[in-house]
Amino acid sequence: MNLEAIIASIVEEMRAAPDRGEVATYIPSLAGVDPGQFGMAVVTADGQVFAGGDAETAFSIQSISKVFALTLALGKVGDRLWNRVGREPSGSAFNSIVQLEAEQGIPRNPFINAGAIVVSDVNLAGHAPREAIGELVHFIRYLASDDGIAIDEAVARSEQETGERNRALAHYMRAFGNLHHPVELTLGVYFHACAIAMSCRQLAMAGRYLMLCGAHPEGGRVISDKRARRINALMLTCGHYDQSGDFAFRVGMPGKSGVGGGILAIVPGKASIAVWSPGLSRNGNSQLGSLALERLADATGWSVFGL
Ligand code: GLU
């Protein structure tokens, strides 16, 4: 298989694609991103890296951070996390509040905003918010073997200024006793996680542990193989909000998207993949990112559902 050629042809198609979706507009720093960009990076199980297009450009990883924050939280409290967060696809928008009422303040899964806010609350326990944020950034640097990964402070500030819906979710969960810290402290951790900036290359590197059954490619173990399997399962079923079924149908890989236009996708045992194009579908997932992964799955036969 010639991955270099496959990626080059995907990049060429995505560069010229007319329907690029709509860039997120809720904060100026995302609204101002050029929708013409497209990047892709693939790290294979034997450690080779293939990259194309704008693969070195840092973008706001937004909700992709939910995967790393979840991994950290599971390391702290283990399966007790599941008393506070569910494991079912939500079938509703990333920032929806309706299910919380019917389900007593327990978010459907850790990859919608409400779930990730609970995960942030878990990661905050015993720390000042600054320490909890620092711990997450250090963890991602360790996963990616890259000390250059950092938070875009302008994005973090804007998230904070415009985050009324997330505040509503957090207050609502606190009313049910499912948030243990003051809302502004927990949200400080959540907003900064969303504001982490990474390139496709860095993101694909950070996802290696999920392709390697929880092992760190440079030695040691990040998490157990069982936990890696479970995180991949959640990415497959819940990683694209109310478009998760469609993504599984078209791409067939565990994946997590963010409103910055990035997607991290995992082919267990084979590859960790990051794609980025800022234009979003109406469900808030990268329009061309999903299409590029569909093309990659078709060209390589990579899927968790067999060839
Ligand atoms: N910062 C966004 C929010 O919390 C993240 C959503 C996303 O990437 O899907 O609303």
Image (tube, rainbow, N blue to C red):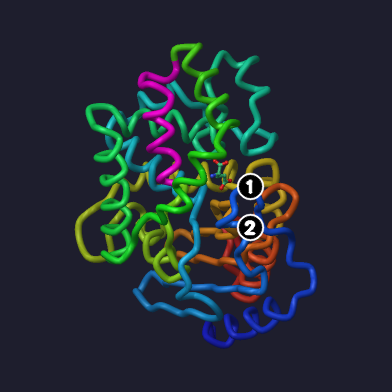
Q: Is residue 195 or residue 253 the one in the foreground?
A: 195
Q: In which quarter of the image is the C terminus?
A: bottom right
- Place of residue 248 in the rendered image (x, y in percent of width and height, measured from the top left): 65, 52
When the figure is inspected, residue 142 is found, relative to residue 113, above or below; the finding is: below
The picture quadrant where one finds residue 18 is: bottom right
Q: In which quarter of the image is the N terminus?
A: bottom right
Residue at 50%, 12% (x, y): give it.
175
From this viewpoint, which residue is outermost toward the left? 220
- Marks 1 and 2 close (CB-CB < 8 Å): yes
Q: Which amino acid does label 2 sit on?
A: Ala
Q: Name the residue under label 1.
A: 26
From this viewpoint, which residue is outermost toward the right? 18
When the figure is inspected, residue 300 is found, relative to residue 112, above or below; the finding is: below
Assign ligand 1 to one image quadrant.
top right
Q: What residue type is labelled 1?
A: Tyr
For residue 31, which numbered disc appears in the image?
A: 2
The residue segment tinted magenta is: 178-193
Mark 1 lies within 8 Å of ligand 1 (Cβ measured): yes
